[in-house]
Structures are given as C-alpha cells and as structure tokens.
Image (cartoon, rainbow, N blue to C red):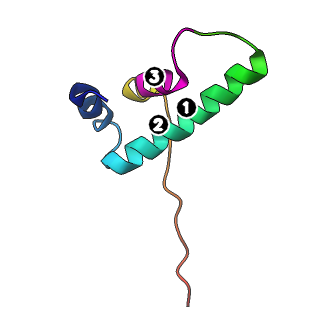
Amino acid sequence: METKAMEKILEHIDNRYEAIRVIAKEARRINALIRLSGEEIEEKPTTIAIKRTIDGKVKYKYEQQEEQE
C-alpha cells in the first residue's frame, strides 16, 4: 500500500493495524457481494475497499467489552 494512501486512511482511522483490519473486512464483504451478483469488475475487492475507506464510506465502531468481576 502506498504511503500516501495509508496517510489518508489514518485521517479516518486512528490505528494503522485497525485500519488494515477494517479494510480486510470490507474487502471480504465486497467480494461476497460480487460473487452473489455474478457481476465482473476490473478492480480487485481490496482496491475498492481501500478507496472506500479513504473516501470515508466505510463505517466501523469499537465494541465495549464488559469487565469481568
């Protein structure tokens, strides 16, 4: 991944490792949608996921973990 692309992604997601995780999950979602539709595309799902993340179209949130007593 280009350094400039990662810098743009980090504007939306604070942690570099979390950004990779979010992009991977989005790429899997896009791949599943492509397979279901039977449509052929020129770009790879990962490339599409990176572009969507840079554009701020991928939403994510942290789940609150409950403390165990």
Is the magenta region chiefly helix, strand or loop?
A: helix
Q: Which residues are magenta?
A: 42-51
| Residue that carries the numbered disc 1 in the rendered image | 27
Q: Residues within 10 Å of mark 2 (few under 14, many from 20)?
A: many
User: How far is mark 2 from mark 1, CA to CA?
Assistant: 6 Å
Residue type at numbered disc 3: Thr
- In the rendered structure, the answer to whether residue 38 lies left or right of residue 56 reads right
Label 2 close to label 1 by CB (< 8 Å): yes
- Using the image, determine if residue 23 lies above or below residue 40: below
Q: CA distance from mark 1 to mark 3?
A: 8 Å
Q: Is residue 5 left or right of residue 33?
A: left
- Find numbered disc 1 in the image and state the secondary structure of the residue it sits on: helix
Q: Residue at x 22, y 26 (%)?
A: 4
Residue 45, quarter of the rendered image: top right
Which numbered marker is on residue 47? 3
Q: Position of residue 21 (x, y in %)?
A: 46, 46
